[in-house]
Amino acid sequence: MLQKMCEFLHNYDFGNKIREYSGTFEIAGGAISLPFLIEGQRFLIKGSILNDGLYTYHAAGIKNDDDSAVVGLHDETFAGTICALAVPPAVIALSAEIKAWVDKYGEKSSSPYASEEVIGVYSYTKASGGSGTGGAITWKDAFSDQLKPYRKVCW
């Protein structure tokens, strides 16, 4: 969810300078050695065919963007960029809140209808209040006020 949130916000740096390391990188055995990162630091892989995305660096293994599961990267050698990020704890906490909201309301919020009922005659109530398709409330709508301070107009 953190990566989706950063993409929506057009923001990976959150006011901190992103350190970019360009070159040829090798992923072997599902792991990559990145001595310029510290334990628990988020990083972004750009320019890879199989592994572009946001991850968390741990000596015991790379974790997905929300730091919840160890992931095995796909073996490859690529010429690209590794961006060492400094994501503030408040942004990580907001990402966890959004993930919990999506887990709870995701299916319901993707429907353009607030309720549907079939008893002899089909009836439905159109959802309202959201900027998503058909007026459905999305995580972007639900967390709009919390996301505003981090949003960039362009990258």
Image (spheres, rainbow, N blue to C red):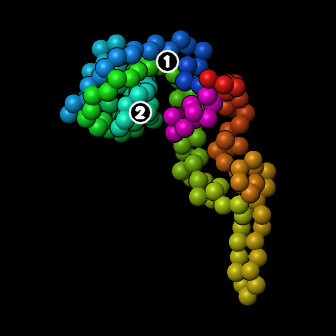
Q: Position of residue 145 (x, y in %)?
A: 73, 33
Q: In the picture, which quadrant includes the C terminus? A: top right
Q: Where is residue 89 in the image (x, y as percent from the top left)?
A: 53, 23
* Residue at figure coordinates x 49%, y 18% from the top left: 86
Residue type at mark 2: give it.
Asp
* Residue at figure coordinates x 34%, y 23% from the top left: 79
For residue 65, which quarter of the picture? top left
For disc 2, the neighbor class at 10 Å (few under 14, some 14 to 19, many from 20) is: some
Q: What element carries label 1?
A: loop
Q: Position of residue 7 (x, y in %)?
A: 57, 33
Count of labels shown? 2
What span is colored magenta in the figure?
A: 1-10
Q: Where is residue 115 in the image (x, y as percent from the top left)?
A: 71, 67
Q: Residue furthest bottom?
A: 120
Residue type at mark 1: give it.
Ala
Residue 41 visible to the viewer: no
Nearer to us in this view, 81 or 100 = 81
Q: Distance between the residues labelled 2 and 1?
A: 18 Å
Q: In this view, does 22 lie to the left or right of 154?
A: left
Magenta segment: does it hold 5?
yes
Magenta segment: does it hold 75?
no
Name the residue carrying label 1.
Answer: 86
Q: Which mark is residue 98?
A: none
Q: Is residue 19 above or below residue 143?
A: above
For residue 112, which quarter of the picture? bottom right
Q: Residue 52 carries which label?
A: 2
